[in-house]
Image: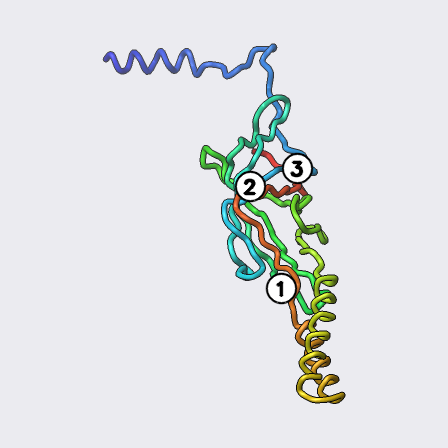
Amino acid sequence: MLALLILSLFLVQGPKKLEMAEDTKILPPVIVPAGTVIPISLTGRLSTKTAKDGDGVYAKTAFPITINNQIVIPEGTNVRGRVVEVKKPGMVKGKAELTLSFQTLVLPNGRTLEIYASLGNPGFAGEKKGEATIEGESSKGQDVKDTVGGAATGGIVGVIVGGRTGGAIGAGAGAVGGILNRGKDIVIDPGTILEIVLDRPLEP
């Protein structure tokens, strides 16, 4: 009997009206705009000597990102990416290249966000090439120096071996030895600060 009475009261009253007060403010979604620069600190070492295409790259945000005085990407947010391409330094004038792609943010609350970002200023010895490639320093000057030095040394050895022909052979061998010196590899130690730049807006 009591149950029927409660049920009848509920049917008479009906559900409560889900109305909002006129002064209630509806906050718009927080959007991190395209072009936002996010400084990140690498947690592992990267080098063109050992890196391979497809290797994982891991970092943490080095500075909080704020929108309207609200932190939307805290410092220490995990950043995941991968090595897209590795180019080792070539002979004489070839430069090492390392192409990176950062694809995911993992917020401290565990939420995972997909990002589309380009590489900003590398911030160390090397230059940016294209949207996501770090180009190492040129070693052309050093290689030429080594070539001249190697040629001179080879020439001396050739003369000792015997006469004019020996000197020519020695000089040629010394020059080849110098040319075979490779340029500088790109080495990025843990803690190095890189910048990524959002290509698309992000909603944390």
- Residue furthest to the left in view is 1
Real-space Cα separation, disc 2 to disc 1, in angstroms: 24 Å
- Screen quadrant of the N terminus: top left
Real-space Cα separation, disc 3 to disc 2, in angstroms: 13 Å
The disc placed on residue 88 is 1
Residue shown at 53%/31% (left/top)? 74
- Screen quadrant of the C terminus: top right
Tell me the element at label 1. loop
Tell me the element at label 2. strand
CB atoms of marks 1 and 3 within 8 Å: no
Is 7 drawn above or below residue 78 in the view shown? above
For disc 2, the marked residue is 41
CB atoms of marks 3 and 2 within 8 Å: no
Which amino acid, mark 2? Ser
Which amino acid, mark 3? Val
Q: Quadrant of residue 40?
A: top right
Q: Quadrant of residue 109?
A: top left
Q: Residues within 10 Å of mark 3 (few under 14, many from 20)?
A: some
Is 57 drawn above or below residue 179 in the view shown? above
Real-space Cα separation, disc 1 to disc 3, in angstroms: 28 Å
Left or right: 141 as drawn, with respect to 25: right
For disc 3, the marked residue is 37
State the residue in front, 73 or 16: 73
Expressed as whole percent of the image width and height from the top left, the position of residue 55 reads 52, 57
Q: Earlier in the sequence, mark 1 or mark 3?
A: 3
Q: Nearer the viewer, mark 1 or mark 3?
A: 1
Q: Quadrant of residue 95?
A: bottom right
